[in-house]
Image: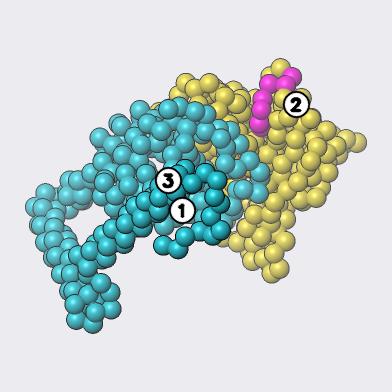
Chain colours: A yellow, B cyan
Amino acid sequence: MENQNPSDDTTHFGYKTVHTEEKVTKVAEVFHSVASKYDMMNDLMSMGVHRIWKRLTIEKSGVRRGHRVLDLAGGTGDLTAKFSKIVGASGQVVLGDINDSMLKVGRTRLLDKGIVGNVDYVQANAECLPFPDNSFDCITIAFGLRNVTDKDAALASMFRVLKPGGRLLILEFSKPVAPGLSPLYDFYSFNILPVMGKIIANDSDSYRYLAESIRMHPDQETLKDMMTTAGFERCEYSNLTGGIVALHRGFKF
Amino acid sequence: MTQTAKQTSNTLSASNPLLIPLLGAIEAGLNQLFAMDPDSLSSLSRFKGRIIALHISDIEQCLYFFPDTSGVQIINHYEGQADTIISGSLLAFARMAMSSEKEKTQAIFKGDISISGDIALGQHFQALFKQLDIDWEEHLSHITGDVIAHSLGNIARGLLGWGKQTLNTLSMDASEYVQYESKDIASTPELEYFSEQIDRIRSDVDRAEARVNRLLQSQLSTEPHTQPSSKPSI
């Protein structure tokens, strides 16, 4: 298990060490707190670049008309909205999130946009997905794996519900690789981000957790190895914006 | 004619990362335009569930349009099959966007632009962009009020009319100068006369060739035992 200490049953929550069961509750608290301002904060924090990262994910998904897609940790439904148009009436998109506040915000937002008919909503834990084996042509998890307590269990669960030939895409913060970017990024994450969180969402702690959890998340190569261990093949990744974010992709054959 | 349109790109490398931000901007701009014209937006809903591919042949890029009731989504890489593919060079598309209906039809017949798959769908989709008619004054009035919006509208119309007239005059003056003053290029009637002359010479040569061939045939048929030593000169 990558980020869990089996001997004393603890894991990390940002830079803090907490009991494994406690992490789920604490992560839930973070997202209950930020759900209403989530989209606005995403735009502000990334200066709109998160839209390009998500577009790249769609481009590499290979999703086509009639496919079944699982958008895990789908939050406010950015990817689901786009997948819904691509899969059409003969396909299906399932927006899954462990947090009911995020799921409610996502559902309301998609309904307001008129995105109905081929979208279903499921409150689900990525570690034990409530779907039969070989159910989906594509699974995406964008900025969600970082918050999962047992990432290996989540990858194994995704592998199980993916159809043979299907692919998993993980869009997640990663380790900057561009020269000179790390100090700037650290300054931004630990000094500017919590202040923005305080001003906009009145919650600096959640955004401090965001910065810390990014540092504790496995880097590009480690995550790729974890995917291979879970059974995925042809695993590869692309660094986006100098490695601040990485898009991993693996196939089930 | 309906046939299944073939996919034009099926490899991961076909997705161009540099194009992605641009696609986002184009998509947002188009959707903003559709949102400002309710008639076009309701027409767009007729295309829901259909996939239209725009293949730009000279840069080997394909844009896939997914229209629905709320606007249009554009992606660069799609592994499935589009319902229709509109194909042409960047220049041909630009020319088509700015030309009249007659010239658009000519572009299709000349082969500059080709439509494969569901041709009617491709043509209707093209027509949709032509019928975009935005009431800028109405949208502006929500911000400034009716009186200011109307005054600004009048100024804009005046400027637009003046701009069009100036552009027309400039274009006519420039063409007159290069045709009649500097005599760098031929005028349209001269060019048409020259083309007619060429056509006439081509027809005359064709007729002469047919006549000579007929004479040779008749000579061969009247003298079956004698072989001509060489072709007679014309």
Rendering coords of residue A67 (x, y %): 60, 26
Q: Amino acid at mark 1?
A: Ser
Q: Which residues are magenta?
A: A133-139
Q: CA distance from mark 1 to mark 2?
A: 39 Å
Q: Chain of mark 2?
A: A
Residue A164: which disc?
A: 2
Rendering coords of residue B168 (x, y %): 17, 66
Establish whether labels 3 and 2 are both on one chain: no
Q: Quadrant of the C terminus of chain B?
A: bottom left
Residue at image mark 1: B89
Establish whether labels 3 and 1 are both on one chain: yes
User: Residue A10: which quarter of the image?
Assistant: top right
Q: Amino acid at mark 2?
A: Pro
Q: Is residue A7 visible?
A: yes
Circles 3, 2 touching at the beta carbon (< 8 Å): no
Residue under the image location 72 percent in, 26 percent down: A162
| Residue at the bottom extreme, as displayed | B182
Q: Secondary structure at mark 1?
A: loop
Q: CA distance from mark 3 to mark 2?
A: 76 Å
Circles 3, 1 touching at the beta carbon (< 8 Å): no
Front in this rendered view, residue A191 or A38: A38
Instruction: Tell me: A77 left or right of A212.
Output: left
Q: Secondary structure at mark 3?
A: helix
Q: Secondary structure at mark 2?
A: strand
Circles 1, 2 touching at the beta carbon (< 8 Å): no
Residue at image mark 3: B218
